[in-house]
Image (cartoon, coloured by chain):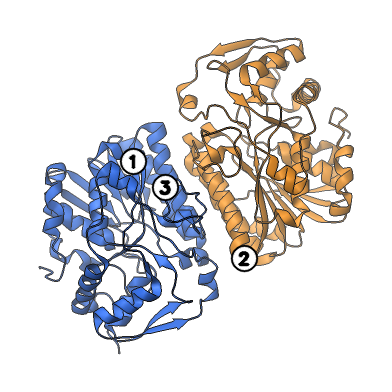
Chain colours: A orange, B blue
Amino acid sequence: MMNSALPDAGDLSAPYRAAYRDHAVLITGGLGFIGSNLARALVQAGARVTLVDSLIPEYGGNVFNVADIQDQVRINISDVRDPFSIEHLLRGQDVLFNLAGQTSHLDSMNDPRKDLDINATAQLSILEACRKVNPDIKVVFASTRQLYGKPDYLPVDEAHPLRPADVNGINKLAGECYHMLYHQVYGLRTCALRLTNTYGPGMRVVDARQTFLGIWMRLLVEGKPIRVFGDGRQLRDFNYVDDCVAALLLAGCQEVANGRVYNLGAPDVIALGDLATQLVATAGQGAVEYVSFPAERKAIDIGDYYGDFSRIRNELGWQPGVLLAQGLRRTLDYYREHHRHYWPAAT
Amino acid sequence: MMNSALPDAGDLSAPYRAAYRDHAVLITGGLGFIGSNLARALVQAGARVTLVDSLIPEYGGNVFNVADIQDQVRINISDVRDPFSIEHLLRGQDVLFNLAGQTSHLDSMNDPRKDLDINATAQLSILEACRKVNPDIKVVFASTRQLYGKPDYLPVDEAHPLRPADVNGINKLAGECYHMLYHQVYGLRTCALRLTNTYGPGMRVVDARQTFLGIWMRLLVEGKPIRVFGDGRQLRDFNYVDDCVAALLLAGCQEVANGRVYNLGAPDVIALGDLATQLVATAGQGAVEYVSFPAERKAIDIGDYYGDFSRIRNELGWQPGVLLAQGLRRTLDYYREHHRHYWPAAT
């Protein structure tokens, strides 16, 4: 089955064929948003790809995300909290893209223990398993700008203090620290990318658990108004998923990345209200509604954020290539065509 | 039973009587080194003191530590990983001194999961319990200089980057972050003291799990040589336990501390080799042996460390009062008298 509305990932994989062809690659969270797009690029680069995903309904995994490549990858449904399955799957792998995580800030406050189990405890057991059964593996960890909390200055570089503003940020911080430590102490070839808002085909759109842009996309396609919290002047940066995948691929094949953390980011910083307006204009339908900040979200809001991505540009040669207008258009087109695979039809 | 060799804690408690008299105070890790000294001061200040301790043999709990006050405190043996006992014990308390922890850096590398369970997971459940059953409680968390890892500059202030050099440091970082977050989001009156090397009567001396000074003290009393790793030029700062207790008491009764982290520290910074020499001179027996760094310790060593404690001096009015020479003498006297309660007699 071909998924014609998917972005042309052929372009993406070309520069990485030499690095990944015939390499064994494991992706945790492989049926999720970023994992599935990464899997597609790796398949096209000639890698042997195994995807592990828990398919927990509240998270990002969706088998439709890999419908077009399902015969070219190995899919293993299990949970990163299950150390036995992960240890088995790690054997013989050349590269681990460690993307599985609980992403909802609000859920992390309501069920902090589950967030801890997935984002910290499971990460430690993955690294212990690497050390034990596959110490030569290359590991790329998907970290997050959430580690910084409310910025002291903008753009935020990697030297910015780490002061997470929610339970999710604290547990992701622990997860990232374990990765760095296992490089430092055991020589494991780990690195971490601190992702900012990533968007594109395959993201969770049924609700705001993965990104608020997800629920916005759904509301737009349904012709309903987008809700912006507060005055909509909070600044954010966005990466289209292909750019994020390129960063992962670059990190996964360069030794200079070992033991390093890198911000992602984008040159086109935008206020959330303006983004909403742009989305409505792109869609040619829908509307923007300003509502007051729900108390439980305001308590963990980080204000303005955008990142300085000069380190990854200088050290790994990455820079984002897809403009926001272009990326939003592709994403909207995708969900207009495939929405039935991402949320239930209205009854 | 009176424990005559104990330092005169009466001096300690006097300034805090107004703040703690008739107050209900819970101390996790209450049979441990710092917890038991704190308990003594609180009893003398007129507080109603409950001690909770797991008495796990590898940790710091020792019933002899509270032999002289055992009839004036409530002792509850349970583990902070048991959320039900902790939730029950938290009800009706005015202040929680949250000192329970796994302290061994080496053990945290060999059994990272257990360190995580105690230093991070249990902390989260303690805070959840506070929020649920006692949201007005004041909480003082015993954090650690280990959060900083290998210093970028000296003395290390609270703005220094957090880059823990072992699993223990990462999990303690998560534990501290949870405390700060629960203040930020839920208004819980939490603060954290980043302790440096603390020493004195009651510390674990059977091995180096709590502090290397512990095993040094034992070897001295046994008339055996002290082993210094490397060239002995690593700088460290030390707080005598009474000073540490004073800092805890000050933090526990001042609202200005809420949401704040504070370094402890001391003006008399010393190289470990010199400290060993001074100890041998104080004891009038023993010797110093220089041995090469064991690989597993070298991998997580942080080099020189000493802290800038001007924040707690300026905000809470704390400063250390016991000189190193004085504190070492008192500690040595204590273990000479009471060693049979801290390690098995030679056979």
Quadrant assignment, res A242: top right
Quadrant (top left, top right, bottom left, bottom right) of the N terminus of chain A:
top right
Task: Say if mark 3 contacts mark 2, CB within 8 Å.
Answer: no
**Is any atom of residue A34 visible in this view?**
yes
Alpha-carbon span between mark 3 and mark 2:
28 Å
Q: Position of residue B318 (x, y in %)?
A: 25, 49
Crowding at mark 3 (Cα within 10 Å: few <14, some 14-19, many 20+):
some
Indicate left or right for B202 with A223 as reference.
Answer: left
Any mark on residue B202, and which?
A: none
Q: Is residue A326 above or below residue B242?
A: above
Please give the chain letter of the residue carrying mark 1.
B
Residue highlighted by disc 1: B190
Judged from the image, the secondary structure of the residue bearing numbered disc 3 is loop
Q: Residue at x 47, y 49 (%)?
A: B160
Q: Amino acid at mark 1?
A: Thr
Residue highlighted by disc 2: A186
Q: Residue at x 47, y 77 (%)?
A: B231
Q: Is residue B185 above or below residue B305?
A: above
Mark toward the start of the polypeptide (1 vs 3): 3
Residue highlighted by disc 3: B158
Quadrant (top left, top right, bottom left, bottom right) of the C terminus of chain A:
top right
Instruction: Please state which of the two labelled residues, at mark 1 or mark 3, is closer to the viewer.
Output: 3
Alpha-carbon span between mark 1 and mark 3:
17 Å
Please give the chain letter of the residue carrying mark 2.
A
Please give the chain letter of the residue carrying mark 3.
B
Alpha-carbon span between mark 1 and mark 2:
35 Å
Q: Amino acid at mark 2?
A: Tyr
Q: Amino acid at mark 3?
A: Glu
Quadrant assignment, res A90: bottom right
Judged from the image, the secondary structure of the residue bearing numbered disc 2 is helix
**Is any atom of residue B75 visible in this view?**
no
